[in-house]
Amino acid sequence: MTTDLDHLRTDLLASIDAAAGLDALEAIRVHALGKAGAVTGLLKTLGTMSPEQRQVEGPRIHALREAVSEALAARKSMLEQAALDARLASERIDMTLPADRLAPGSVHPVSQVMDELAEIFADLGFAVATGPEIEDDWHNFTALNIPETHPARAMHDTFYCEQPGDDDGQSPPSDDTRGASPAGAKQGGSGRRRFLLRTHTSPVQIRTMMSQTPPIRIIAPGRVYRSDSDATHTPMFHQIEGLVIDRGITLGHLKWTLETFLKAFFERDDIVLRLRPSYFPFTEPSAEVDVGYTLVNGKRVIGGSGDAADGGWMEVLGSGMVHPKVIAACGLDPDEWQGFAFGTGVDRLAMLKYAMDDLRAFFDGDLRWLKHYGFSAFDVPTLSGGVGA
């Protein structure tokens, strides 16, 4: 039997080495180790042998099984690696082929103008301040000297938020540390505090004056909301306001600041301003700021005097000296601290500078419009390179 085992071992190992593929190798495994396999049959004969014979033949048969199993495993690993290598060679990606070109994105004009404004005012020593877009009517109206009967408080001009129940004694989100308590923000005599989508970024000025010690120089850019919609108005738009609080501030400081800002923004030295007396509840005196323009090929171009034969005046800003009542509402002494404030629409500035006609297109998400008016992400506004580069 020893000779038979040696012959069987030699034949099986030779067949395993000669197997050309995994299917052929599996057939050899079944032939040798399957239920009716040659090695399996030898293992079954151990039960019919005498103890002495089993003691001699048993180790040899088990050694044959182990040798065949190890040879099968080694050959299988080799064949699998060869199959993988062949697949990698046949399915290899040609890295020399050009990749599909992805359409580049662009920076929205509003975002670009926001960055331009921040760059200009940073050079003038202003910091950027932010605040919540959901405000209470104390910060949005009352602290700004806007009376209860002012039309801006009406439902058809302001988006009020629904809130169940009466005032629960909880204050709205606030960084205020001094001055009148927002808990006094009520509508009429109902005892309810009203919350709304802010109609301007002026509440940021209030929060800043109540949380910081003067001198203060800030700009407050952000989204604001009003119930209005046409070619030049949208229910949501972007606004930037500026505030300076210090000792000895005059209207002359305001005019110089606005003139310097507009010259840098429109990148023209021939900017001419006209301040017209106006009325805002939160400033006294108040002024609308007009900028001169000239007509070039039938289009208005910012620059030059509006009194010229081919020119005119265009309103771009609202401004004024901060009302003493507003300063006092924030816990400051108006006899010691004075200041000026101004505000304008960021979307409007973008329309004027980059010749856009319809404000509603800003928010349509039309890729064709964005491709035409958008900016490259590498066009970072700098004063040295031109804020509109």
Image (cartoon, rainbow, N blue to C red):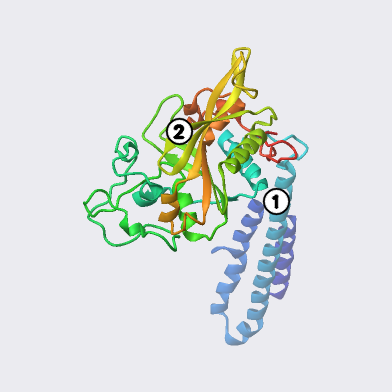
Q: CA distance from mark 1 to mark 2?
A: 82 Å
Between residues 205 and 253, which one lies in front from this camera angle? 253
Residue 84, disc: 1
On screen, residue 382 versus residue 342, left or right, reads right
Where does the C terminus fall, quadrant-wise?
top right
On screen, residue 353 versus residue 288, left or right, reads right
Label 1 or label 2, whichever comes before in sequence order: 1
Residue 245 position in % (x across, y down): 54, 52
Q: Amino acid at mark 1?
A: Leu
In the picture, residue 102 is in which quadrant?
A: top right
What kind of element bears circle 1? Answer: helix
Mark 1 packing: few (<14 Cα in 10 Å), some, or many (20+)?
few
Examine the rendered structure and indicate whether residue 311 appears above or below residue 215: above
Examine the rendered structure and indicate whether residue 205 appears above or below residue 239: below
Mark 2 packing: few (<14 Cα in 10 Å), some, or many (20+)?
some
Residue 294 position in % (x across, y down): 62, 18
Between residues 102 and 120, which one lies in front from this camera angle? 120
Look at 65% across and 42% down and name the residue there: 120
* Residue tagged 2: 278
What kind of element bears circle 2? Answer: strand
Look at 68% across and 77% down and name the residue there: 60
Q: How many marks?
A: 2
Examine the rendered structure and indicate whether residue 365 appears above or below residue 284: above
Between residues 277 and 121, which one lies in front from this camera angle? 277
Look at 32% across and 54% down and name the residue there: 185
On screen, residue 154 versus residue 5, left or right, reads left
Residue at the outermost bottom position: 52
Q: Amino acid at mark 2?
A: Ser
